[in-house]
Image (cartoon, rainbow, N blue to C red):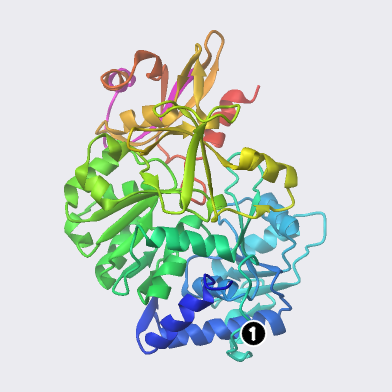
Amino acid sequence: MKELVYHRMFIPAIENNADAVGFYDQGYEGTFADHGDRTFRLCTALHRELGVERSDRFAVMAMNSHQYLELWHAAFLGAGIINPLNLRLAGAELDYIVRDSGTEVVFVDTFFAQVFADAMAASDEPSPVRQVVLIGEGDAPHDIRYEDLLASADPVIPNEPEELDGAVLMYTGGTTGLPKGVLLDHRAELLNLHHVGMVVHFDPESVYLHQTPMFHAASMGGILGTPAAGGVSVFMPMFDPVGVVDLIEKYNVTQTVMVPTMIGMMLNQPGYRSERLSSLELLTYGASPMPAAILDTLLSDYPDLDISQGYGMTECSAILTFLDARDHRVGGPRLRSAGKAVPGVSLSIQDEQGNEVPRGETGEVCARGGNFMTEYWNKPEETEEAFSGGWYHTGDAGYFDDAGYLFLVDRVKDMIVTGGENVYSVEVESCLSRHTAVAQVAVIGIPHELWVEQVHAIVVLHPGAEVTVEELRDHAKETIAGYKVPKSIEFRSEPLPLSGAMKVLKRELRAPYWED
């Protein structure tokens, strides 16, 4: 069976929209025919010029671009397994991923070419990379230029891949240690695209802005769904809150995906005016919890905007649940939920022994469906542990309400145990974020001689704002129990450290307190 393979979706989109401009990227305007021609040439070049076979991995370390989309589409046409590299990884992590994945061909842009070259040169072992392809112009370490590669190849569509062939090897962000390679096959990716498409319609009239990094699983709807539907793709190389607004206004963008950190930065920029985003019809957020204050601002400023939340992870090809636009308009307590499972996904809340707990009780969120990874690359024991009992164990703590809405309370590893009480950092962060002076907040557990851990908040204020520790603690006491209120609050002037997926790196925030 091959009905679900991306081939079947993308080829008709090219044929039906051949002369329509569908791709805007910093002065580049490409029609669907242009995009197809370039992608088919890339497929040929990967095989004939670079020696990449269907089961081989090729890595990409670059900012968002139409070339990046071509590389994604080449992988989904069966030209090889794409290994998108997180742009914020340290040199040692990059070297580890390249070696662990067996990657021999790497595509880099001008901005990251030297970063990648330095990472490979720093290792004591010879680099396994035999070809570096440079995207764009400029003087940077490379073996061949991307445009020269395409010019030398014929536009030939490769034979269609099997459903269980690997399509993506995506390494997790590394917020808790060395990254793990998540191998996703064509079937898993396309099933999840269908799951999402049953909740969020892929509209041929849509104009989608790629601003979430294209190495991230949250970008898959825009990478696969929008072009297949005949929608327009607009590219922002790297997130910039001012530039986002400019592009939305210039191209009348109707749809985009952002993580809450990005939304907060956009709303808090100087001179922000809500009318500049009037073309937006659908805004999807996810990847980390949404601070209550930011969601309140969105709902107030954009009453006609369809706001949806997706919850998932790389291992499930991105999405497990959706809180849709209707849920956001109804409002109420369910705004703090992650929504319901998408069609085709089953969820279960389990205790430490793998027993399902009653609704309303907190446990680990577990899931199963056809959209999950094949394995953690070269890690059979961790793969077996992740799928213990036939369910994928997410590492997130949550509960169901009576209607089946999933409420996430924290990462299991981020739960703070203080004086025998469990404190979920997300709940405390949501409370503190509602104070008008607070721009960013992260809550962690730090050592305490008596309570083992104490609740500690790290706060970044809005420019020019002032608030005292006691004022913030009094604010928290209005909505959460006393044992959850931070015992200590630290103010920082610099933004909190973020991963490449724009998640706060709590591991880095905790490290200085737990070193000894």
**Residue denoted by label 1:** 44
Judge by depth and name the residue closer to the eye, 208 or 507: 208
- The question of residue 446 being in magenta is answered with no
Whether residue 281 can be seen here: yes
Q: Amino acid at mark 1?
A: Thr
Left or right of 245 on screen, residue 28: right
Residue reaching furthest to the top: 450
Q: Is residue 495 above or below residue 459?
A: below
Q: Nearer the viewer, residue 169 or 97?
A: 169
Whether residue 27 can be seen here: no
Q: Which image quarter holds the N terminus? A: bottom right
Q: Residues within 10 Å of mark 1 (few under 14, many from 20)?
A: many
> Which residue occupies the foreground of this view, 444 or 284?
284
Q: Residue furthest right?
A: 125
Counting from the top left corner in percent of width and height, residue 471 is at 27, 20
- Give coordinates of residue 101: x percent, y percent: 72, 59
In the rendered image, which quarter is residue 339 located in? top left
For residue 327, side relative to residue 414 (left or right): left
What residue is shown at x 34% (from left), y 61% (from top)? 256
User: From which residue to which does the magenta span run?
Assistant: 454-472
- Where does residue 395 sit, x and y in percent of width and height? 55, 37
Side (left or right) of 456 relative to 303: right
Question: Where is the C terminus found, in terms of image quarters?
Answer: top right
At horizontal 17% and vertical 59% (from top left) the residue drawn is 275
| Residue appearing at x 28%, y 61% in the figure | 245
52 vs 40: above or below: above
Residue 455 falls within the magenta-colored stretch: yes
Q: Is residue 297 above or below residue 84?
A: above
Q: Residue 222: name its quadrant.
A: bottom left
Q: Is residue 462 left or right of residue 419?
A: left
Secondary-structure class at tag 1: helix
